[in-house]
Every structure is written in C-alpha cells, then in structure tokens.
Amino acid sequence: MPKFLIQATYTPEGTKGLLKEGASGRRDAVDRVVGDLGGTVEAMYFAFGEDDLVLIIDLPDPVSMAAVSLAVKASGALHTRATPLLTLEEVDEAAGRQVAFRAPGA
C-alpha cells in the first residue's frame, strides 16, 4: 500500500479548532478519514516550527491521497504537503530500470 508523508500547518481558524477539541480529537478525525478510504495512520506527531503536524499514512492509491488532500485544503483549516514515500526495494527496482533521458544541451 502506498505510504505518504504529510506535513501540515494550521491556519488561525484551524488552530482555534485544535484548541477546542484537543490533539486526541484531531487524531480521531484523521483516523476516521484515512480509515474510511481503506488506509491506516502509521504515525502522527504535532510539532512547532515550520510544520504544526507531521503524519505518515498508508492509503490504497494516489487517488485516495488526492481525495484527502482536496477535502482538507477545501476546509481552509490547514495548508498541507503530501510526499509519496518509497521503500528501499522500490528504489532498487527503479534504479534497475532503463530510462532514455538526454540532459538539456547534451
């Protein structure tokens, strides 16, 4: 199952919601959304600095990730970035594939 790193920053309105329902309330909401799409939450951490929230989630496919991303961004509560994560085996497989590429100007 594809794995994704999610980095998020709360908007002022999103922060108000977090303060109202707490971190465990947000974890429940994330578990529900990801679970409804057939996925799981591997890790969820709150942070401070550039990102307020960091998650690693498994979802059945990239379309499911896009659906989550669109819904979350439409809420206006968070700004998010999703990064697909690859296993060592997937990188080894990719490294073994022939790719016909010519660098610009070469």
Image: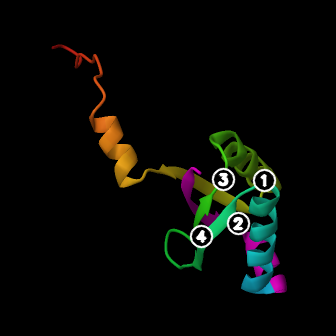
Secondary structure at badge 4 equals strand
Q: Quadrant of the C terminus?
A: top left
Amino acid type, residue under disc 1 in the picture: Leu
Q: Mark 2: which amino acid?
A: Thr
Nearer the N terminus, badge 2 or badge 1?
A: 2
Q: Residues within 10 Å of mark 1 (few under 14, many from 20)?
A: some
Q: Which residue is mark 2?
A: 11
Report the side of 92 relative to 6 (left or right).
Answer: left
Measure how far apart labels 4 and 1 are at the Cα level.
Answer: 15 Å
Q: Which residue position is annotated with label 1? A: 37
- At a point 70% along the width and 66% down the height, the residue shown is 11
Tell me: 87 left or right of 73.
Answer: left
Look at the numbered disc 2 and give the secondary structure of its residue. loop
Q: Which disc, if any, is residue 42?
A: 4
49 horizontally vs 105: left or right: right
Disc nearer the start of the sequence (3/1): 1
Q: Tell whether position 74 is magenta.
A: no
Find out whether the residues at labels 3 and 1 contact each other: C-beta distance under 8 Å. yes
- How far is the residue under mark 2 from the one under mark 4? 24 Å
User: Could you say which is closer to the camera, residue 95 or residue 67?
Assistant: 95
